[in-house]
Image: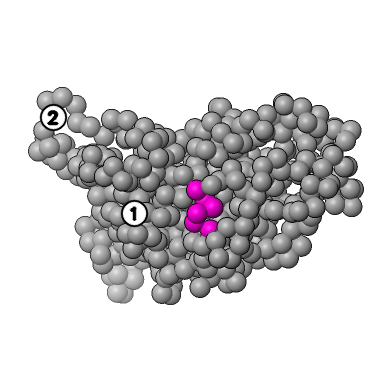
């Protein structure tokens, strides 16, 4: 009998599984040793219009009613009851479900036509008004989620349930990195002047889910230590650190051969990235080479580490260095109370820097291949939360329609898309579900959202989930 055939017939299940695991470990080791040959990302699937994304996420739900969705009849509708025919059977949150009345509150700040297209933008955003010809405002965004945590999880990961991979992780997995010394996905946080403290921001929003953990976002903190434990302890030289990492990698490779856990290999990648970041991050976060004109453009707050303005400037520096996806989370947009006070302050935080980022990218020739996205997890209600006209009143959550804007990266500039009713409550034309938004963002970077999948729990998991999603081709160049 053939000895190999005899061996195959007598091998035990335990031995077979053990050898298979070691084989997986060897494959992972080969991926580390020869990344250009083995560790290739799945995409792009076609020629991209953009190479990178800066996502200016406004956590808490900016009021589309007050900022972008101009309706002249709302002045006449002010203080009238929101009709049941408009409300329909839509769920409302526990904060207003027991209100006896739902009075309409017209915007208290003027809006004006801006740019060649005549885009309506609130006077609360005077700097954004100056980039009207560069942005596309989608006024017909839709989400089913009405509370913060499921809503922000939904728009960032494609599911209201936790445990799924984030948009940035999918991009990192699908396209890889353009700079081996910095993560492909970086997250920055800031607190606004509206609701303080704002809604909690959880690390799972930039998690990798069922993707390899090397694709999760890396959060940079403000100040002298952007990444905790990145600096070497006193007395440790670069040479000593290098030898320590080599020894640690050898032990991890041996462990990977024994157990075949790909996360062991991901741990090696994380250590190596941290080692390279030790030299790359200080240069990245050092603004001393920026001119006074740049600080004038972004505003005085750009000098304060951790501010929204400073993070916008830092985002530009990142994409110049090849970071694939930069996401800013700015808290404070949850205006349930004191809308008249909180909303102007919150807009002041972000208006100049958001517009400056678009202008800065454009003049540096980077906007064409950089997709900038501005928006939150949902909008706000046209009706008052609390007594009409009282200083403590505000607006509740509203996912039935809300507004976001985009610029660059092959997006049609100076354009408004979608139509809502006179109450800014329901979409009348061209609804854009958040699944459609994510499909469009992937498309602009050359990824077919239906083809970028990972098998997990018996399903081909993808960012846009199992329900139908469409690329919004009408807003593309």
Q: Is mark 1 on a helix, strand or loop?
A: helix
Please tell me whether residue 258 belongs to the stretch shown in magenta.
Answer: no
Residue 12 figure quarter: bottom left
Please give the label number shown on residue 236.
Answer: 2
Q: Which quadrant holds the N terminus?
A: bottom left
Front position in the image: 3 or 472 = 472
Label 2's element? loop
| Residue 129 within the magenta-colored segment of the rendering | yes
Name the mark nearer the viewer: 1 or 2.
1
Q: Give the range drawn in magenta.
A: 127-132
Q: Where is residue 18 in the image (x, y as percent from the top left)?
A: 35, 52
Q: Is residue 474 visible?
A: yes
Q: Are marks 1 and 2 in contact (CB under 8 Å)?
A: no
Q: How crowded is mark 2: few (under 14 residues within 10 Å), some or many (20 or more)?
A: few
Q: In the figure, residue 463 lies in which quadrant?
A: bottom right
How far apart are the alpha carbons under marks 1 and 2?
Answer: 31 Å
Rendering coords of residue 297 (x, y %): 38, 46
Counting from the top left corner in percent of width and height, residue 251 is at 22, 41
Residue drawn at x 63%, y 53% is 112
Q: Name the residue under label 1.
A: 319
Question: Residue 370 vs residue 154: left or right?
Answer: left
Instruction: Report the predominant secondary structure element of the magenta stretch.
Output: helix
Mark 1 or 2 closer to N-term?
Answer: 2
- Position of residue 24 in the picture relative to residue 276 (left or right): right
Task: Tell me the number on the disc at residue 197.
Answer: none
In the image, what residue occupies the spot 40% across and 65% down? 368
Let me know if residue 184 appears in the view. Answer: no
């Amino acid at each position: 009998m053939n000895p190999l055939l005899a061996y195959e017939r007598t091998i035990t299940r335990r031995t077979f599984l053990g050898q298979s695991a070691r084989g997986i470990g060897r494959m992972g080791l080969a991926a580390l040793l020869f990344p250009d040959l083995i560790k290739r990302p799945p995409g792009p699937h076609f020629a991209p219009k953009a190479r990178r994304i800066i996502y200016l996420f406004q956590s808490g739900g900016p009021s589309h009613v007050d900022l972008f969705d101009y309706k002249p009849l709302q002045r006449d509708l002010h203080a009238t009851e929101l009709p049941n025919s408009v409300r329909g059977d839509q769920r409302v949150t526990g904060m207003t479900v027991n209100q006896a009345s739902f009075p309409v509150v017209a915007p208290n700040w003027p809006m004006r036509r801006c740019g060649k297209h005549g885009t309506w933008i609130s006077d609360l955003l005077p700097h954004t008004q100056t980039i009207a010809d560069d942005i596309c405002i989608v006024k017909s965004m839709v989400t089913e989620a009405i509370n913060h945590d499921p809503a922000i999880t939904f728009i960032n990961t494609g599911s209201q349930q936790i445990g799924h991979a984030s948009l940035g992780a999918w991009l990192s997995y699908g396209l890889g990195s353009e700079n081996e010394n910095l993560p492909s996905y970086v997250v920055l946080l800031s607190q606004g002047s509206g609701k303080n403290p704002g809604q909690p921001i959880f690390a799972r929003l930039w998690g990798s889910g069922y993707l390899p953990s090397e694709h999760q976002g890396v959060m940079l903190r403000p100040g002298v230590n952007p990444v905790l434990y990145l600096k070497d302890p006193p007395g440790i030289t670069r040479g000593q650190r290098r030898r320590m990492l080599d020894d640690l990698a050898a032990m991890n490779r041996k462990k990977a051969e024994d157990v075949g856990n790909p996360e062991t290999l991901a741990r090696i990648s994380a250590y190596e990235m941290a080692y390279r970041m030790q030299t790359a991050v200080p240069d990245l976060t050092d603004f001393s080479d920026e001119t006074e004109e740049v600080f004038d453009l972004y505003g005085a707050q750009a000098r304060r580490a951790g501010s929204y303005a400073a993070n916008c400037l830092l985002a530009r520096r990142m994409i110049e260095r090849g970071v694939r996806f930069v996401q800013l989370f700015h808290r404070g947009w949850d205006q349930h109370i004191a809308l008249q006070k909180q909303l102007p302050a919150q807009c002041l935080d972000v208006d100049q820097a958001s517009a400056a980022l678009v202008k800065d990218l454009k003049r540096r020739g980077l906007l064409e291949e950089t997709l900038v996205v501005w928006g939150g997890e949902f909008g706000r209600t046209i009706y008052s939360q609390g007594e009409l006209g009282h200083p403590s009143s505000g607006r509740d959550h509203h996912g039935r329609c809300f507004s976001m804007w985009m610029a660059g990266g092959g997006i049609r500039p100076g354009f408004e898309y979608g139509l809502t009713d006179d109450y800014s409550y329901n979409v009348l034309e061209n609804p854009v579900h958040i699944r459609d938004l994510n499909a469009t963002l992937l498309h602009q970077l050359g990824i077919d959202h239906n083809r970028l999948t990972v098998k997990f729990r018996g399903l081909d998991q993808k960012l846009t989930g199992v329900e139908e999603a469409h690329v919004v081709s009408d807003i593309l160049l």
